[in-house]
Image (cartoon, helix red, strand yellow):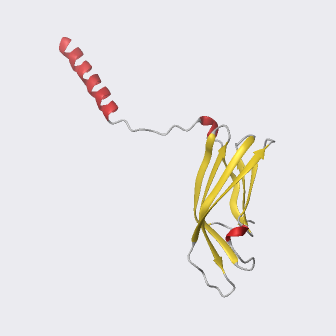
Amino acid sequence: MKSFFSLALSLVALFVGTSAFNARPTTVIPVKFDAVHFVSGPCLSARSVLGQVAGIGTGGITVTLSGNFICTNKGGNDPAPKTFSVTNHYNKTTGGNFKLNVDVTSLCPNRNWTFKVSDLRVVISTDGDGVVLDQTFAGALAACK
């Protein structure tokens, strides 16, 4: 009986020691931010990035969009993609979805040229909670319907 107890105690010590050694760091996301998500979009409408985000609440909001863009002239010449980053601040005073509408007109010098955005990254932070959404949309951004 004594040797069975020693064996069981040794196995428990081995399991606990091995589990602690193999533990990996994990990222803990506060539960209240799990609800922040896109309801629609993002999409490209003329020279604006549009979308609706749920779960943000009210107060000061900062939205940063970054990615690549191309301005194609009427002759069909596609210059090399360029990177951009645009930051806007909002004060959301009512509940409900946050309507994202970021004007990116200044990126393309001629309104007659076709404007395309790709690999869009959207980072949304609130004044009180920091970053609540950081999402990248790979590939070309679809036109709004």
Residue 93: give x, y in percent of width and height.
Answer: 80, 42
- Residue in front for this viewpoint, 14 or 133: 133
Is the C terminus in the top left, top right, bottom left or bottom right quadrant? bottom right
Q: Is residue 123 something one can see in this rendering?
A: yes
Residue 138: give x, y in percent of width and height.
Answer: 56, 62
Residue found at the far right of this picture:
94
Reply above or below: 17 against 44. above
Q: Horizontal placement of 143 versus 21: left or right?
A: right
Reply above or below: 20 against 46. above
Q: Horizontal placement of 105 versus 138: left or right?
A: right
Q: Residue at x 62, y 44 (%)?
A: 132
Q: How many marks?
A: 0
Residue found at the far left of this picture:
3
Residue 6: give x, y in percent of width and height.
Answer: 21, 16
Residue 116 found in image quarter: bottom right
Q: Residue at x 67, y 83 (%)?
A: 73
Is the N terminus in the top left, top right, bottom left or bottom right quadrant? top left
Q: Is residue 119 something one can see in this rendering?
A: no
Reply above or below: 94 against 115. above
Residue 5 found in image quarter: top left
Residue found at the far top of this picture:
2
Q: Horizontal placement of 130 versus 102: left or right?
A: left
Q: Horizontal placement of 119 versus 37: left or right?
A: left
Reply above or below: 37 against 50. above
Residue found at the far bottom of this picture:
75
Q: Residue at x 27, y 23 (%)?
A: 13
Residue 39: give x, y in percent of width and height.
Answer: 70, 52
Q: Residue at x 33, y 36 (%)?
A: 22
Residue 58 found in image quarter: top right
